[in-house]
Every structure is written in structure tokens, then in C-alpha cells.
Image: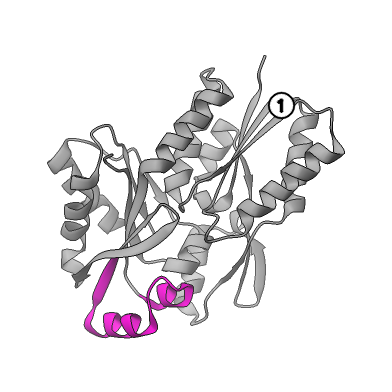
């Protein structure tokens, strides 16, 4: 009988209560900020937002190392798992996925008779675009789906998922290279905010919005026409929950669908886009 574990990294932004409920294995990124070093999962996110609001610096995050994955694989093997499905942050934005492949190779070299299968899946995206898929995969495993069915679901999801994000400040997007220095300066000066699409291992600015009052309408106008008919949607947000609620209200008016869930962005994502943002994860039309 198969025994399946879904493994991911903390950049998936899955709420702790869901991690515990579904028994997902999550390896935490290391973060350094304001003279403090910590694991992402150990830092209460509202405390981290507060730290960012009170300090001018940019948090530094570090990719996961192969040793961390190797230890996780060895532990799961010892616990009798037959299949480990590893779903990780975009390989174009982090060396984490490559580290997992090195650990997988090392595991089989050191345990050549091991029959545990390790599936390595690059999400090509960030935050709840793979966090949501991880949650659904863990539910599928609990409901009796086999590893191949789960992997097929994940591959199909990652072919079409996308996040549309509007940051409230361009300070962090500039530092991470999401926007240029000139665009960030003009944007903050004239309160012009980009709408950034994260999908297919890339990030592109698909539109812009002027002022806070137009954020909700602009995001909804972009997201709804792109949603597949069977698409759930997840609202991600930082410290501003009001925008998130308004977005769901407007999408519901247009589609009759409620959000599948809400999730706060974690340390890794907020370090690159800022703690004051709002976004929507969808499955795009084919």
C-alpha cells in the first residue's frame, strides 16, 4: 500500500494550521533582517510586517541547501513512505529546486536499494500559486489518490496557473529586480502601481494603476477575463486585509464564485514585493 508525502518549502505561504491538519512536510527558508537571523516559519508574519515597516533595509533570504532535502528524504524513507512529491518555488528565482535534485541523487546513491520514489516538481511560480496546489495534492493523497494522479494534477495546474499582484510600494520590487529603478522612482512619486503577472517562470508588468482607489477594479478587470471556467481563485495579501475582501466581493459579483481561500504572504515573498500588496491566484484559460 502506498504512503505518500507532499513536501514543499515555506515560500508556498501555506497557513500553519493547514500544514498541521494535512501533515505536509515544509522546509523553512532562512531569513536575515535588521541583525536577526531566523527561519521563516518561526517568525510570526505580522511581527515581520511590523519589522519591515519600521526599518529601511531589505530582508535577505537564502535558498534551501541540498543537505536539508537529503535529511528530509532520509527521514521520510525511515518512516516508511513509498512516494515523496516535492513541489518547490520557481527554479528561475531560487537555487532551491536545484538543491533538491542534488539531494535526490545523493539519496539514491547512498540508498541504492530504496524503493521510495521521489518526484521533483518545479512550480515555475511563487507563493500560493504552488501553495494552493500543494494543499490540494495533500487532500488528494488523504482521499486515496496515487502518486501518478497527484503529479498529473500538479503538472496541469502549473501549466496554467498565474498570480496577478499589485504592490503598494515599489521599494522592494526595485531591489528584487521586478521593476527598474527609474520605474520605481516615478511610480512612488506619482503613485503609479504596476500589475505584475507571475507565471511560467517569469514576471511581467501587464498593466498599471494610478492611486489606491482603482486597485480593486483594475485587478478584477484583469483577472476575471483570464480565469478558466473551472478555476478556483485564491486571494493573497500582506498587511492590508481590506483590499483583499473588496477583491473577493467584486469577483463574486462578476463570477458568482467565492475565494477558495485567503493567505498572507510570508517573509520570502514580502521581502521581494513588500508587505503591503494584494494579489489573486488563478488557473488561466487554455
The reply to whether the magenta stretch includes residue 190 is: yes
Residue farthest left in this picture: 253
Magenta region: 170-195
Does 253 sit left or right of 189 as displayed?
left
User: Residue at left 55%, top 31%?
Assistant: 22
Crowding near pointer 1: few (<14 within 10 Å), some, many (20+)? some
Residue 239 in sight here:
no
Q: Which residue is mark 1?
A: 81
Q: Residue at x 47, y 68 (%)?
A: 272
243 relative position to 158: left or right: left
Residue 62, image x and y in percent?
63, 64
For mark 1, give the secondary structure. loop
**Which quarter of the image is occupied by the C terminus?**
top left
Residue with the most extreme top position: 1
Closer to the camera in the image, 169 or 149: 149
Image quadrant where residue 213 sits: bottom left
Q: Main secondary structure of the magenta part?
A: helix
Q: Residue at x 43, y 74 (%)?
A: 172
Instruction: State the scheme by which the image is colored.
Output: one colour
Which residue is drawn at the image coordinates 42% and 66% (left, top)? 275
State the image coordinates of residue 278 (x, y, percent, origin top left): 32, 59
Is 135 displayed left or right of 203 in the figure? right
Quarter of the picture containing the N terminus is top right
Residue 186: % across, % down: 28, 84
- Give coordinates of residue 124: x percent, y percent: 48, 51
Amino acid at each position: 500500500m502506498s504512503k505518500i508525502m507532499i513536501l514543499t518549502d515555506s515560500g508556498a505561504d501555506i497557513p500553519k494550521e493547514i500544514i498541521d491538519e494535512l501533515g505536509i512536510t515544509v522546509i523553512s527558508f532562512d531569513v536575515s533582517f535588521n541583525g536577526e537571523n531566523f527561519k521563516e516559519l518561526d517568525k510570526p508574519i505580522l511581527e515581520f510586517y511590523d519589522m519591515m515597516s519600521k526599518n529601511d533595509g531589505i530582508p535577505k533570504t537564502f535558498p534551501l541547501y541540498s543537505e536539508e532535502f537529503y535529511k528530509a528524504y532520509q527521514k521520510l524513507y525511515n518512516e516508511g513512505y513509498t512516494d515523496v512529491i516535492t513541489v518547490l518555488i520557481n527554479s528561475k528565482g531560487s537555487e532551491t529546486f536545484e538543491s533538491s535534485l542534488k539531494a535526490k541523487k545523493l539519496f539514491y546513491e547512498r540508498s541504492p536499494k530504496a524503493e521510495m520514489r521521489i518526484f521533483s516538481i518545479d512550480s515555475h511560480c511563487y507563493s500560493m500559486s504552488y501553495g494552493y496546489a500543494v494543499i490540494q495534492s495533500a487532500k488528494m493523497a488523504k482521499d486515496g489518490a496515487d502518486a501518478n494522479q497527484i503529479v498529473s494534477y500538479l503538472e496541469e495546474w502549473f501549466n496554467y496557473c498565474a498570480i496577478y499582484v499589485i504592490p503598494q510600494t515599489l521599494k522592494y520590487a526595485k531591489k528584487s529586480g521586478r521593476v527598474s529603478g527609474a520605474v520605481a522612482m516615478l511610480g512612488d512619486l506619482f503613485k503609479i502601481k504596476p500589475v505584475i503577472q507571475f507565471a511560467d517562470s517569469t514576471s511581467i508588468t501587464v498593466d498599471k494603476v494610478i492611486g489606491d482607489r482603482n486597485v480593486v477594479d483594475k485587478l478584477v478587470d484583469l483577472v476575471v477575463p483570464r480565469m478558466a471556467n473551472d478555476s478556483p481563485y485564491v486571494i493573497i495579501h500582506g498587511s492590508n486585509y481590506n483590499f483583499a475582501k473588496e477583491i473577493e466581493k467584486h469577483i463574486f459579483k462578476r463570477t458568482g464564485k467565492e475565494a477558495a481561500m485567503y493567505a498572507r504572504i510570508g517573509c520570502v515573498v514580502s521581502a521581494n514585493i513588500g508587505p503591503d500588496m494584494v494579489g489573486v491566484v488563478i488557473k488561466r484559460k487554455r
